[in-house]
Amino acid sequence: MISFKSIKIVSLLVAIGMTTVACDQVSRGLGSLTSNKYAKPRSGSVWVVPPPQLEPVALDKKTVYISFRNISDADMDLTETLKQAATEQGWVVVRDPTKATFRLRASLRFWGEVKPETGGANKASSMGGITGAAVGLGAAAALHSSGRSGLTSAAVGIGVGGLVAVGMSNASRPREWALICDFVLEEYTKEAVSFTLARASGSASSAGAGASGSRMSVGGGTSQSNTSSGSLTKKSNYFPHGIRLSVWANQMNMKEMEAQPHVDKRLQKVVKQMLPQ
């Protein structure tokens, strides 16, 4: 037999759930009326390490090999998103990396909530060098700390009226989500050249991987000598440009599932800014 106390608990939980949804809708509606920029979902991108400025590529040279690895805690695979974005820009995605004019290797570093208005830049700047990218073409990212905002908890015994007040307060607060990816864009040329390659990444790394201001003749194949514990000298026909990107979305009390479609759409748009046109 269900007790009266159990019914009260269930009713309270239902009220909490309805209150949360209602508060989000009301807060966002009021925000629209008052021109609050967080009333509607927004998204954007931050180039923590920008892509290189490359010369246009002939149509018969627009071949790219794309690979993806996830080294974050998120359950996410961006392989098809990246391939689709490249295809829509007129690139032919090939399976054999030795047949590609460019090779785009992506590593997902982070997906989660960040401090509003940071665009994930603080988080991204604390990640050190870009593994597998050439060192010395850009300044190392400065170390910053990221934060979070919002109410941490609410007392259990405050009642539905109090829950409405807390719910409205939470629903009015902007929440921001960011996806941070490292890219190594490898550019092929006929003549191989030597460069210093970053081998390790992390907040303790001092090696800065960046991008050049112009197209570079590059190359590769064999490692020649260690230059430090975090880098090595390499000669290759594929020169590795390092890129770090943070894609973000925010809104009043935005949930993770609400943020992800906006971030995915934005990511597809910025792939064309990494590959030469």
Image (tube, helix red, strand yellow):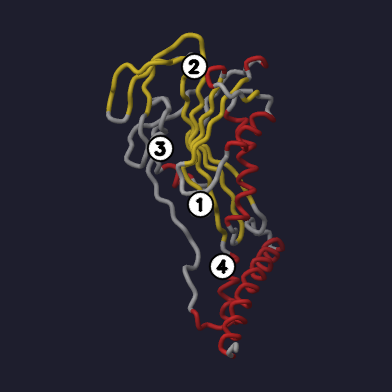
- Could you tell me how far apart the alpha carbons at marks 4 and 3 are, in whole angstroms? 33 Å
Give neighbour class at mark 1: few <14, some 14-19, many 20+ (Cα, 10 Å): some
Tell me which residue sits at (60%, 34%) in the image: 82
Whether residues under marks 2 and 3 lie with C-beta atoms below 8 angstroms apart, the answer is no
| Tag of residue 112 | 1
Badge nearest the viewer, 1 or 3:
1
Residue 170: give its label.
4
Pointers 4 and 2 in contact (C-beta within 8 Å): no
Identify the residue at horizontal 40%, vertical 37% (top origin). Answer: 141
Disc number placed over residue 141 in the picture, else none: 3
Classify 10 Å Cα crowding around label 2: few (below 14), some (14-19), many (20 and above): some
What number is the disc on residue 216? 2
The reply to whether callout 1 and callout 2 are in contact (CB within 8 Å) is no
- Of the two numbered discs 1 and 2 on the same chain, state the one appearing first in sequence: 1
Placement of the N terminus among the 4 image quadrants: bottom right
User: Quadrant of the image for the C terminus?
Assistant: top right
Instruction: Name the amino acid, label 4.
Output: Asn
Separation (CA) of disc 1 from disc 3:
20 Å
At horizontal 57% and vertical 85% (from top left) the residue drawn is 6
Query: CB under 8 Å between callouts 4 and 3?
Result: no
Residue type (three-letter) at the residue carrying disc 2: Met
Q: Earlier in the sequence, mark 1 or mark 4?
A: 1
Mark toward the viewer: 1 or 4: 1
Give the distance between the C-alpha atoms of the residues marked 1 and 2, in whole angstroms: 35 Å
For the point 60% across and 66% down, the residue is 171
Mark toward the start of the polypeptide (4 vs 3)? 3
Amino acid carrying mark 3 in the image = Ala
Count neighbours of disc 3 (C-alpha within 10 A) and say few if under 14, some if 14 to 19, many if 20 or more. Answer: many
Residue 167 coordinates in the image, percent (x, y): 58, 72
In space, the residues marked 1 and 4 are separated at their CA atoms by 18 Å
Secondary element under disc 2, as helix, strand or loop, is loop
Give above or below for 116 relative to 46.
below
